[in-house]
């Protein structure tokens, strides 16, 4: 089967300042279907730039990028927008939900910009289905500010799924979450991955990266490491462990109180 | 097209900032309301003038003393120039009314007209009003019936008789206990004043002139602010000799046979008087259309002027919209970034913001129309002004405010559409 992502020697050079900044210096990469890749690196390593190019928000200065077999490095702004809408799903660090708009309407948003017009009934069904996947169908009419951080991120994941993308891109999806909700969100990603969705995730936390199947480390715009995750974490097990520890702590507290 | 979805989003965005939207729309609301109110009141005033001139009678040609030039103020003629004489009026009668067989006459009525302010005394009461000196043709020319008694006839004019025909208001003020029938034969004293200058003084010195009431005019009611029943008619000869002590006329009323002969009568009268005045055009001949044009010219000018001022306020309202749309674009940069990341084209964002601006300005326009109409009607009732809302003005005002939305909304919307999604997403 063809790889979802096939990039060949891509470079990105920013010309804006006095000195051109060579952010990505010849990265070649193939990501197959059903992969779950962590993209790691210090700030300034070029991982965000690479992510923007993978997400078709930015075009490489040099090199080619085949997304699902289509060369996207030559497309114009509107064509890129359509690719983002149809083939990609985005999950951001800051959730990026529209304020004062219900969870359901946030999830429906990508459908509004689809190439083919969808009936509002069908849109609603799709959005509800995606909210159900992330376990939030009972919160459909809640505004983002009525939801916890973890719930907001799950709404954002549902939104990323609504157009059935080829590739889910997550940019530090747990960056604004505490460790417990981080594990929950990673659990959602793992579940989606098991169902066959390809995921690329930027993170700088090793803990989080360990939930992925493969990890890449970028430094100064080149990939310095690319290998399968050893000793992979499974969200369900981690959550169970956490629960056990909490129960123990509670028992301990109760015991000391009784004494 | 995703137009309706975009429209719904725009309405939702406006509702989210309801207070801000109202304040922004206020500029347009006030502008449009001002335009509509001005036009309604202006139209009302114009219609009133037209009705007043039409109510003068049918197929009239009026001669005023002095050369009014091109469409100058007609009213300044009263008591001003002294060039129009009773002999002129006689010549018109001799020339066009009485000289030929009846069917040939292009003129069917002529009345000299002289007016001056005076004081009337009767029954121990007194009342100040306009005293009109006219000829027996006058009631016919003005299509004004005599309700009780009779109008004076040619012999009374010839003898400068001391007879008067009064309006209802005069009776109400001088004979409050009597009805129209019983005032016939009552005596009143008229004191000339004002216009006649020394003549008025002389009249007062002699203790006024006694007149006998011979008729009562039919009630005409109030036209705008003018009480049309506050009138007293006496023979013009009596007026000139006994009240105003003038030798000249205020106007001459000439009634043409029909609408088609108005132009001919106008030309004939002009020729005749020019000849009589030895080629000097020291008089003005106008038909009702000329008078209407002259009188409404000032109303029109006022309407245009106020309309222009209101237009400026629309412009200011538009700038207000542009301002708030720019703020809105900056404030919602992140939202724009999200939309673009999820697949919105620049065009979609442009449409969204443009529709917001147009919705804001059009709603403002509609509210402004409603406010303008109700405001002008309220003001009209309060002030007793006639009001005539104009559909054309409404359509133009709403259309114009929508155009204001397009014009002033385009720049902010384009700014939004040209944002780079990466920068917009990063915007804090």
Image (cartoon, rainbow, N blue to C red):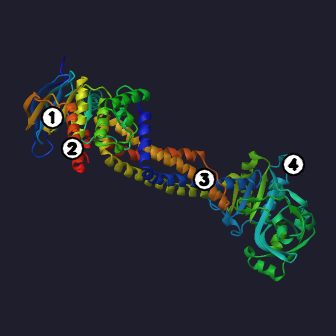
Per the image, label 4 sits on a secondary structure element best described as helix
Please tell me if label 1 and label 4 are on a single chain. no
- Residue B113 drawn at (x, y percent): 78, 64
- For the residues marked 3 and 2, what is the alpha-carbon distance in whole angstroms? 73 Å
Give the labeled residue for mark 4: B102
Please tell me if label 4 and label 2 are on a single chain. no
- Residue B273 drawn at (x, y percent): 73, 59
Residue at left 35%, top 38%? B349
Parent chain of label 3: B
Q: Where, quadrant-wise, is the N terminus of chain B in this rendering? A: top left
Q: Is residue A185 above or below residue B254?
A: above
Badge 1 density bin: few <14, some 14–19, many ≥20, Cα 10 Å: many
Per the image, label 2 sits on a secondary structure element best described as helix
Q: Is residue A93 above or below residue B78?
A: above
Give the labeled residue for mark 2: A249
- Residue A229 drawn at (x, y percent): 11, 29
Please tell me if label 3 and label 1 are on a single chain. no
- For the residues marked 3 and 1, what is the alpha-carbon distance in whole angstroms? 68 Å
Mark seen at residue B402: none
Tag 2 and tag 1, C-beta contact below 8 Å: no
Parent chain of label 1: A
**B34 left or right of A71 in image:** right
Please tell me if label 2 and label 1 are on a single chain. yes
Per the image, label 1 sits on a secondary structure element best described as helix
Give the labeled residue for mark 3: B374
Give the labeled residue for mark 1: A209
- For the residues marked 4 and 3, what is the alpha-carbon distance in whole angstroms? 54 Å
Between label 4 and label 3, give the one nearer the viewer.
Answer: 3
Disc nearer the start of the sequence (2/1) = 1
């Amino acid at each position: 089967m063809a790889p979802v992502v096939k990039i060949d020697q891509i470079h990105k050079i920013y010309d804006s300042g006095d000195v051109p900044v060579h952010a990505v210096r010849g990265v070649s990469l193939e990501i197959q279907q059903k992969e779950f890749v962590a993209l790691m690196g210090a700030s300034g390593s070029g991982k965000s730039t690479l992510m923007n190019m993978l997400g078709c928000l930015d075009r490489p200065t040099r090199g080619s990028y085949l997304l699902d077999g289509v060369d996207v490095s030559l497309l114009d702004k509107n064509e890129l927008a359509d690719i983002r809408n149809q083939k990609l799903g985005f999950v951001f660090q800051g959730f990026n939900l529209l304020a004062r708009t219900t969870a359901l309407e946030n999830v429906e948003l990508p459908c509004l910009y689809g190439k083919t017009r969808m009936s509002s009934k069908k849109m609603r069904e799709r959005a509800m289905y995606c909210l159900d996947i992330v376990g939030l169908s009972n919160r459909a009419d809640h505004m983002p500010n009525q939801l916890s951080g973890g719930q907001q991120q799950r709404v954002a994941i549902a939104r990323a799924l609504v157009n059935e993308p080829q590739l889910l891109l997550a940019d530090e999806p747990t960056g604004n979450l505490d460790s417990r909700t981080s594990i929950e969100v990673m659990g959602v990603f793992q579940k989606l991955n098991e169902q066959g969705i390809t995921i690329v995730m930027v993170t700088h936390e090793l803990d989080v990266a360990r939930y992925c199947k493969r990890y890449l480390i970028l430094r100064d715009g080149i990939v310095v490491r690319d290998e399968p995750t050893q000793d992979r974490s499974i969200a369900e097990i981690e959550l169970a462990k956490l629960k056990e520890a909490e129960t123990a702590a509670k028992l301990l507290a109760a015991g000391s109180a009784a004494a | 097209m995703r137009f309706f979805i975009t429209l719904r989003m725009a309405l939702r965005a406006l509702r989210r900032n309801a207070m801000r939207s109202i304040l922004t729309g206020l500029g347009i609301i006030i502008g449009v309301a001002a335009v509509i109110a001005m036009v309604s009141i202006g139209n009302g005033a114009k219609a009133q003038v037209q009705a007043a001139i039409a109510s003068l009678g049918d197929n009239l040609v009026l001669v005023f003393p002095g050369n009014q030039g091109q469409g100058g103020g007609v009213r300044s003629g009263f008591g001003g120039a002294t060039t129009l004489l009773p002999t002129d009026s006689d010549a018109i009668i001799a020339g066009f009314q009485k000289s030929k067989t009846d069917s040939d006459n292009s003129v069917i009525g002529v009345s000299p007209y002289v007016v001056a302010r005076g004081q009337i005394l009767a029954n121990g009461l007194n009342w100040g009003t306009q005293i009109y000196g006219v000829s027996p043709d006058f009631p016919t020319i003005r299509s004004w019936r005599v309700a009780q008694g009779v109008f004076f006839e040619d012999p009374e004019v010839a003898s400068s008789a001391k007879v008067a025909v009064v309006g209802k208001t005069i009776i109400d003020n001088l004979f409050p206990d009597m009805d129209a029938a019983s005032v016939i034969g009552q005596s009143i004293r008229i004191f000339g004043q004002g216009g006649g200058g020394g003549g008025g003084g002389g009249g007062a010195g002699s203790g006024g002139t006694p007149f006998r009431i011979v008729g009562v005019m039919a009630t005409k009611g109030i036209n705008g602010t003018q009480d049309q029943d506050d009138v007293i008619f006496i023979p013009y000869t009596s007026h000139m000799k006994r009240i105003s002590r003038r030798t000249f006329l205020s106007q001459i009323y000439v009634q043409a046979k029909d609408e088609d002969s108005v132009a001919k009568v106008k030309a004939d009268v002009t020729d005749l008087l020019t000849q009589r005045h030895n080629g000097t055009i020291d008089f003005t001949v106008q038909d009702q259309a000329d008078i209407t044009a002259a009188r409404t010219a000032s109303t029109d000018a006022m309407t245009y002027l106020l309309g222009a001022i209101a237009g400026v306020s629309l412009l200011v309202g538009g700038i207000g919209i542009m301002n708030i749309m720019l703020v809105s674009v900056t404030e919602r940069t992140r939202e724009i970034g999200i939309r673009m990341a999820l697949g919105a084209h620049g065009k979609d964002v442009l449409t969204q913001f443009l529709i917001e601006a147009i919705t804001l300005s059009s709603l403002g326009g509609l509210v402004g129309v409603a406010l303008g109409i109700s405001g002008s009607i309220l003001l009209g009732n309060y002030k007793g002004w006639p009001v005539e809302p104009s559909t054309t003005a409404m359509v133009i005002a709403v259309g114009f405010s929508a155009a204001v939305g397009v014009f002033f909304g385009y720049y902010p919307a384009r700014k939004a559409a040209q944002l780079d999604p990466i920068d917009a997403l990063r915007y804090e």
